[in-house]
Amino acid sequence: MTVGRGNGPQGLPGISVTGRRAGTFCLLLIAALCVQATRVQVFRADELNHNRANQRLTVERYSQPRGNILAGADSVTGSEPTGGRYDYKRTYTDGPLYAAVTGYASQAYGNSQLEGIEDDLLSGTDSRLASWAVWDAVARRQNPGGDVRTTIDRAAQQAAMRGLGGRQGAVAAIEPATGRILALASTPSYDPGSFAGSSAADQAAWNRLQADPDQPMLNRALRQTYPPGSAFKVVTAAAALQNGVVTDIDAPTTAPYPYVLPGTTTPLVNDTEACNEPGQSLDTAMVLSCNSVLGHLGVQVGLDRMVATAEGFGFNDPKLDTPVRPARSNFDTTMDKAQLALSSIGQFDTAATPLVMAMVAAGVANNGTVMRPQLVDRLTKSDGTTVQLMRPVTYRQAVTPAVAGQVQRLMTDVVENGTGRNARIGGAVVGGKTGTAQHGVDNTGTPYAWFISWAKPDGSDGVPPVAVAVVIADSDATDVTGGGLAAPVARSVMQAVLAG
């Protein structure tokens, strides 16, 4: 018997059924390999290129000097040769001063914030940097890293960090008309350059920072929320005026005293006896920071309309990118009336980042229009050619210009006659609101001291050039209040911008 011979489908001798099956199977294997290679090299290329386990990408990223992050005309970052596996590593000028702005770029621990979001541009792999994009992609040629030019005002940033000192806290300052972030400070801070490499010393520095109970790597200006306390009363006052609950800020309100939280037997207490009488006007209630009046007004406005006003200023938005994404500031959408009263004075579950509270002050200063906050002014090639220019974008119209004008007067009266006197600036009009927020079990924790404000030169009819939010989260001072601790910090930041 002859083995391995037979007739093919067209009568050709020499190919057995088994042979045809083996050939077909081999063809299927080759096809499957082609499909897999295409899937890996084309469809999964970007995913694999950016996989943390891909050391080739890290080697490539640090094979040349990294592009820089700038504040004004000055670079706050750099690169230096290492002589090791990675040719260059990141350096920082005044690293702790700008850590809340830059984030970090580390050979061992990756990158964060602007260093992470704009990594492709800074490392030179962004296709927008290429003169001949197709050829560069084929040749895998790396372009010089581009630069990120921020909106930060150096003087304002320095004033913010100097004002916070060694205390745990944060500052966010915004240009109301554009949304440009002028200062973004968080303390205690850290030096991103201390772990930018991959040595044992870098690892030790990283481990120390991770173990520090004060969490210096937490960006408190963007990534931490706090109960805003009475600083939130600006939102409640705006909501009351926007919805006609109050039509005259100097007229008596219907607020009773004592004001018992609806559905309970618990009165909403005030911090000063001057608030302890019924019918206080909205202006008096803001100047004295009367809980009973603003809690009552919040309930009169109603849950849906309070939520709408809060969201107009940036609350409940999980994607408020700057482009760095901040934590979501919260104003509950489901509450009973007692909870709404507490939320209307910045307590219960109300919580905000300093960024969003700066947006509240900026929106009032900008005649009710809230601009989307932006930390980046433009992206450029290494030669300064613009790759992308960021333009001001309207976020929301929180309240009408008429209502904003009334709230501006309320805030001015707080500084001139009330709890915000420490924010006064000679030759300037300043509006502000203090906040002292209770927290901890049975409110036993040291209160959070808040101050939100805006300022403009005396006699100016334009939009104020700066709005600020300050929170100080811990202090051994005897006067733990927004007016005593936070207002002086805000004043120094506003003075720096006005002087510029």
Image: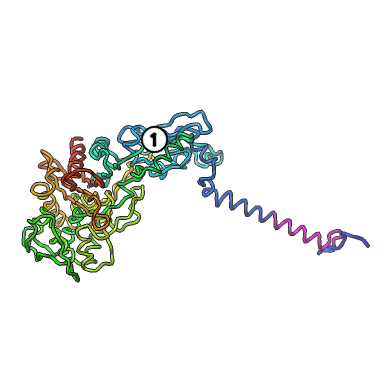
Name the residue at 65% across, 52% down. Answer: 34
Extreme residue toward the bottom, this view = 263
In the rendering, at what x and y percent does residue 275 appear? 9, 58
Please give left or right for residue 7 compared with residue 44 in the image: right
- Judging from the image, the colouring scheme is rainbow
Where does the magenta region start and end? 12-29
Q: Nearer the viewer, residue 411 or 268?
A: 268
In the rendering, at what x and y percent does residue 131 appear? 47, 37
In the rendering, at what x and y percent does residue 309 appear? 23, 60
Badge 1 is on which residue?
68
At mark 1, the secondary structure is: loop
Name the residue at 19% across, 70% down. Answer: 264
The quadrant of the image that shows the C terminus is top left
Q: Nearer the viewer, residue 255 or 363?
A: 255
Residue 258 vertical placement versus 186 (above, below): below
In the rendering, at what x and y percent does residue 371 appear? 26, 51
Extreme residue toward the right, this view = 1
Name the residue at 17% across, 69% down. Answer: 265
Q: Nearer the viewer, residue 333 or 275?
A: 275
Residue 24 vertical placement versus 101 (above, below): below
The type of residue carrying mark 1 is Asn
Q: Quadrant of residue 337?
A: bottom left
Q: Quadrant of residue 190?
A: top left
Q: Predominant secondary structure in magenta? A: helix
Number of residues whose C-alpha sits closer than 10 Å to that of mark 1, classed few (under 14), some (14–19) or many (20 or more): many
Is 26 magenta? The answer is: yes
Residue 406, visible in the rendered structure: no
